[in-house]
Image (cartoon, rainbow, N blue to C red):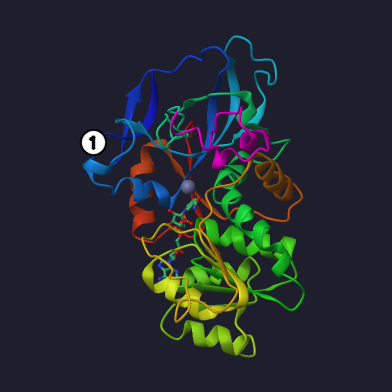
Amino acid sequence: MMKAVQYRTVGSAPEAVEVPVPEPGPGQVLLKVTAAGLCHSDLAVMSWPAEQFPYPLPLTLGHEGVGTVAALGSGVTEVAEGDEVAVYGPWGCGRCRICAEGRENYCPHAAGLGIMPPGLGSPGALAEYMLVDSPRHLVPLNGLDPVQAAPLTDAGLTPYHAIRTSLPKLVPGSTAVVIGVGGLGHLAVQLLRALTSARVVALDVSKEKLELARSVGAHETLLSNGEAAARVRELTGGTGAEVVLDFVGAEATLAVAAASVAVAGDVTVVGIGGGTLAIGFGGGVPFGVSASAPYWGSRVELIDVVGLAREGLVSSHVETFSIVEAPLAYERLHAGEINGRAVVLPHG
Ligand code: NAD
Ligand code: ZN
């Protein structure tokens, strides 16, 4: 038996429980989980009503996993026992054109085939052991610290994917606004600094988070309130920011995004805060603005992010918890009390 953190019934709090250690079937890999990150999306999942709940319950949580290969299913030759790896979470069918490009996060067949990411439908990383459906979904750590690596699999990968799309606009002299400097946002600030020469302006409602933003490289920090967009305009000589990345996605932050973005800029909505952005003539956003709501990232992008961390260009600011403390860590995340990422060490 092993410990796992499960969401067991709709509306209840997550619990640390004992479940059987899974056995790898053909083509699968069993990992001994060394670190697992807690994402705000888990809180969103646990707030959905029963009628809309899309996954089987009980659900072992955790979609940011790092581990050591513990056992191989038949036919697996690409990894060996003892390898330290990060799990690529947005599993696709592996056969279509989009998956062949490594963009499994956009596989149009996964849902129809019942393929679900670990922690978001399939048993996740908040457990002593986890199954990975294919060695294709493992990225070697090559010496990177597992605790550092766990947040990279989503909190690093998702902003990296979002920022890459906007790189042509992040030219010298440009400005990028990061709204929400939590798990994803604090890595977004670092990725912007590592990949671009843009000036980075970070917004949050918490002073501690703004301090973290500054310490990881934000040039300017602003409290996220009714004045924020005007301040962004001031800081940019009236033109606005070329790229606005919203890691909250609420009505209020999308209004700030729309009012802060420059003509022909990008608004990228990563946060699932339930807001929507109006596009159209007569209100909405300035001329030529592109808006997108990206999901997670591609396999090659995870390889890149792990590489950036290994080079010391990005590092996860983490607070660690034991597996039995995971429910408490979720409470603290809900209360806005985690600065950076909460990471669970299932083996202490
Ligand atoms: P988090 O809780 O670690 O960070 C959220 C941050 O936003 C906190 O620092 C909080 O203080 C700040 N915040 C809250 N309200 C704000 C406001 N009005 N203005 C400015 N800042 C505000 O969350 P996280 O794990 O980093 O996730 C961020 C969001 O991204 C969540 O909505 C999550 O569900 C979503 N997400 C989306 C994807 C995707 O693929 N699109 C992937 C992962 C997470
Ligand atoms: Zn997530």
In the depicted structure, whether residue 158 falls above or below residue 276: above
Examine the image and state in which quarter residue 323 appears.
top left
Secondary element at image label 1: loop
Residue, disc 1: 9
Q: Residue at x 38, y 18 (%)?
A: 20
- What's the residue at 55%, 29% (across, down)? 93
| Residue 101 sits inside the magenta stretch | yes
Q: Is residue 119 magenta?
A: no
Q: Residue at x 69, y 15 (%)?
A: 77
- Residue 212 at what x, y percent from top left? 56, 67
Residue 154 placement, left or right of 275:
right
Residue 153 position within the rendered picture, expressed as x and y whole percent measured from the top left:
58, 43
Residue 83 is situated, as x and y percent measured from the top left of the image, at 67, 25
- Disc 1 C-beta below 8 A from ligand 1: no
Instruction: Determine whether 283 is above or below 335 in the image.
Output: below
Instruction: Using residue 6 as the reference point, say whether residue 174 is left or right of it.
Output: right
Q: Quadrant of residue 12?
A: top left
Q: Can residue 117 be seen here?
A: yes
Magenta segment, principal secondary structure? loop
Q: Report the magenta residues as a range.
A: 89-112
Crowding at dot 1, Cα within 10 Å, few <14 / some 14-19 / many 20+, comes out as: some
Q: Position of residue 236 (x, y in %)?
A: 64, 85
Outermost residue on the front side: it is 281
| Three-letter amino acid code at the position of disc 1 | Thr
